[in-house]
Image (cartoon, rainbow, N blue to C red):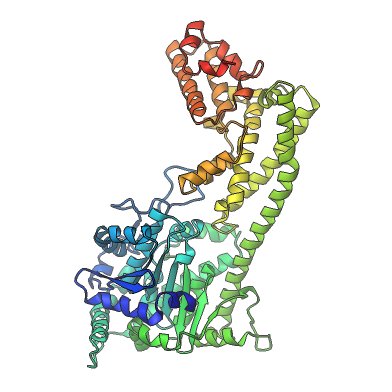
Amino acid sequence: MASVFARFGGPETIRRASYAAYNNANGYVSQDFGNNTVCVAFSGSLDPSAIGRVDNKFGVCKINENNDCFESMVDGTTRKEPRERATVYSEALTKFLGLWNDIKAQVGEALRTGKTVVFTGHSIGGGIATLATLASLEKCGKGASVFAITFGFPLIGDEILARAVRRQGWANHFYNVVSKNDVFARTLLAPCISVSGFVEALLPYWQRSVEQMNNNDADILMEPADLDFNKYLVTVLHHACAVVNLITVNNMEPGNKLISSLKPAVKLSPYRPFGYYLFCSKEGGLFVENNEAVLPILFYSLASAQGEASISDHTGYDKVFNAHTNVVNLEGLQNLPLSQGAPQSSAMEIQLNALGIGIQNTRARLALRAAGEAEHKLIDNRNKLKDELAKLLEGHMTKVKEYRTRCLNKHVGYYDAFREQKEKEDFHANLNRLNLAAFYDKLEDMVETHQVPDDFQFIEELIKDGTEYRLYVEPLDIANYYRLGKHEDSGHYIRNARPRRYKALEKWLADIKPEEKKVGVLDSIPGITKDSLFWAHVEEVSWIMSNPRENLEVKRTRCNDLQNIVRQLLEKKELCKEEVVMGESSFVKWWKKLSPQDQQISPIASIFQG
């Protein structure tokens, strides 16, 4: 973390920029830091009544409300369309949208010319900085040199948003600084209505405090009178405790169905962390990359705070950086000591003690251990799946490819050979198909139930291997479906029988950015038709053509649809013509059902030339 700050002129430089934005009527300040770096700081000023002026319990709204800046921030594990959008704190989104049009051209130009852009902000200004960074990454992609550094506003959106950021590989673009006693940094863990009175009274005080610091005003600013600081603190801690307990139990028993069933019924705060966190105390700082550990630290570190300190710390980020060089990484959580006699890493233990999470705080240590074990389990699952996939590719997938090659050498397409099931090798191909299906069903389920890291489905080799599997093996699933006549009882394959694994693999490929990468994956798999549903289209149209109950207009429309599919594949050079027109293939049989006149005027007649 220290190296990140050093790159941008040091932590105090960033902190001063975030505070300076309070004095600007525009709501933001843009500065050139030198070293090819531009800093945009957003004001943390907020209408005191805003937190109580919300439409729902926690003040959230859909991230795409009144904008199209956050296309990727959706539930990435579902195949249903439209996919559920992430939710964010509505007041932060409203303020962001009010400022973004003024600065996006400047930001875009800076990034195009190779500059680094740092968005920063204190309090809700940090939330705006996070949204600005997200919008910039959506526009420019993972390689963009754009970062968010926030102070006192570590939470902005729900679990869908947090997972989407990690899925895109953007976590290292977000750095959140949180003071041990800063109660406002935890406020969104409580319902808005329960804290609105406290926040309305405190916001003007906090904003004047920052403005005094900016003006080097030494006058003592009186805290709001008749405000029960401890009640505010206890209210936030009460609701934060419920969130942390649920998360900890889920980390300890990730497959517990009772916990899963309780989640929709218990209306707890939806806000979840993403990015990296620096928790500060007078002793230094603890740098946290494990997102499962963030909420427990937010709660347990605040639990030892006193009422007045929890108020003053929200504007005291100038003080916590006096010891910023004493920053250690939080690591090895699954082996975190729980007793005095256990070996301890002194540097890390000093920071944990300073945050109130010392060896004496057993509940906090158990929560952190559970977070470490959860992270370790995700990584272990990922590694096991990758090893298993490598063996499958070397075995079953290679045999499917060899089967296809042998069929072509016999002048018959492997789709039609498998559909007929006349040879012993067709039977063995079916066994390979079933083994591969079992693995990809398991993989898809583990991604959907979050048993692997969120970015697992974006691993390039997984996308490439999964796409190759889909293009080679789904035609066999289609052939098997129609060979057994299942379409007569259950309906056609595409609408009624397509397995979830293929839908998921297709969706993961579609989610790749930029478009050139997607094309690159398909180009890396030569010599096969790039539409894994091609033969399903052929089967469906062939069945309609043979059905005497279908009227002529429907038959003509569906034939035209199939010809358009073929034409598009030909234009993109994504059709394996040799296989499609080989011998008496299913496609050739359909073609022969057309009248000579229709064949002559067909836009795909050239497929049979030569």
Q: Residue furthest left?
A: 25
In the picture, measured across the screen, residue 308 lies left or right of residue 201, that is right
**Residue 522 position by quadrant:** top right
In the picture, measured across the screen, residue 170 lies left or right of residue 52, that is right
Residue 8 seen anywhere in this rendered image of the structure: yes
Q: Residue at x 41, y 86 (%)?
A: 320
Q: Position of residue 98 (x, y in %)?
A: 24, 60
- Using the image as rendered, state which of residue 323 and residue 178 is in the foreground: 323
Give above or below for 360 relative to 265: below
**Residue 580 position by quadrant:** top right
Give above or below for 7 relative to 587: below
Q: Position of residue 293 (x, y in %)?
A: 53, 72
- Using the image as rendered, state which of residue 90 and residue 266 is in the foreground: 90
**Residue 480 position by quadrant:** top right
Is the C terminus in the top left, top right, bottom left or bottom right quadrant? top right
Residue 507 seen anywhere in this rendered image of the structure: no
Q: Residue at x 43, y 47 (%)?
A: 83
Q: Position of residue 484 (x, y in %)?
A: 67, 24
Give above or below for 519 relative to 103: above
In the picture, measured across the screen, residue 495 lies left or right of residue 121, that is right
Q: Position of residue 225 (x, y in %)?
A: 23, 88
Q: Residue furthest right?
A: 424
Give above or below for 511 relative to 602: below
